[in-house]
Amino acid sequence: MNHKIIQLGIMHLNDCMDLDQKSLNGLWSKSQWEKELTEPKRICLGILEFETKKILGLCSAWLVIDELHITFIAVHPIHQRKGLGKFLFLDLIKRSKPLQINQIHLEVKNNNEPAKAFYKSMGFKTVGIRSNFYKDGSDALMLNKETHNKG
Ligand SMILES: CC(C)(COP(=O)(O)OP(=O)(O)OC[C@H]1O[C@@H](n2cnc3c(N)ncnc32)[C@H](O)[C@@H]1OP(=O)(O)O)[C@@H](O)C(=O)NCCC(=O)NCCS
């Protein structure tokens, strides 16, 4: 394997903004990323390629009591569909185990078919819809996954 998962910090601000730009056309502003990379209740992970020292993918999640809310997940477009998103997501699950997480939530654009297929393959179920949720007027699907920490 020529990559590993690392915890991201403020020193990765430019990498995050660059990947955000390439994969989601710049979903968040610089100040949003600064917040995401520094607030204690957030888990921000990246896939670091050893050779190039580049971040190939990243995910970010908020910890709210016993729930994890995924706010961002993306893999660099030229590295998509190679299992990196799954690698990142499984690592997030592993790290959340000691935190006694019972549920993982997220929202996805109803027209984002690759992401919907990805989340379905990771075991998420659709639990609701928010109409007109995004700036472009599209709806958000609310997805949920139980993590079996109960009992
Ligand atoms: C969603 C995303 C992170 C998935 O990452 P990825 O590294 O490409 O996904 P993986 O290679 O780990 O795929 C795991 C499984 O998800 C499903 N999947 C992933 N991408 C898919 C696609 N484009 N079409 C159909 N199924 C897909 C498949 O079941 C796949 O398993 P398989 O390749 O063995 O068939 C990636 O497509 C991405 O960065 N998209 C742009 C950013 C984005 O939309 N983020 C989500 C915002 S809510």
Image: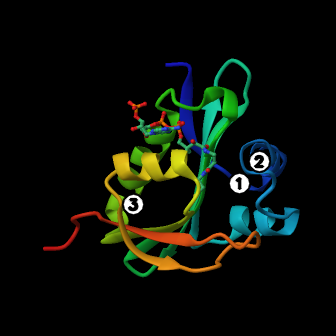
Q: Disc 3 residue type?
A: Ser
Residue 102 position, x and y percent, is 30, 71
Q: Taking 90 as reference, is 41 above or below it?
A: below
- Label 1 belongs to which residue? 9
Q: Disc 1 residue type?
A: Gly
Q: Earlier in the sequence, mark 3 or mark 1?
A: 1
- Label 3 belongs to which residue? 96
Question: Badge 1, how many Cα within 10 Å: few under 14, some, many 20+?
Answer: some
The label shown at residue 12 is 2
Question: Badge 3, how many Cα within 10 Å: few under 14, some, many 20+?
Answer: many
Say which residue appears at 49% left-offset and 67% top-offset.
106
Q: Is residue 13 left or right of residue 150?
A: right
Q: Is 95 or 117 nearer to us in this picture?
A: 117
Mark 2 CB lies closer than 8 A to ligand 1: no
Q: Residue furthest left?
A: 151
Say which residue appears at 68% left-offset and 34% top-offset.
77
Q: Is 52 or 83 nearer to us in this picture?
A: 83
Q: Is residue 98 left or right of residue 149?
A: right
Q: Is residue 20 left or right of residue 145?
A: right
Q: CA distance from mark 1 to mark 2?
A: 6 Å
Which secondary structure lies at badge 3?
A: helix
Say which residue appears at 33% left-offset and 62% top-offset.
98
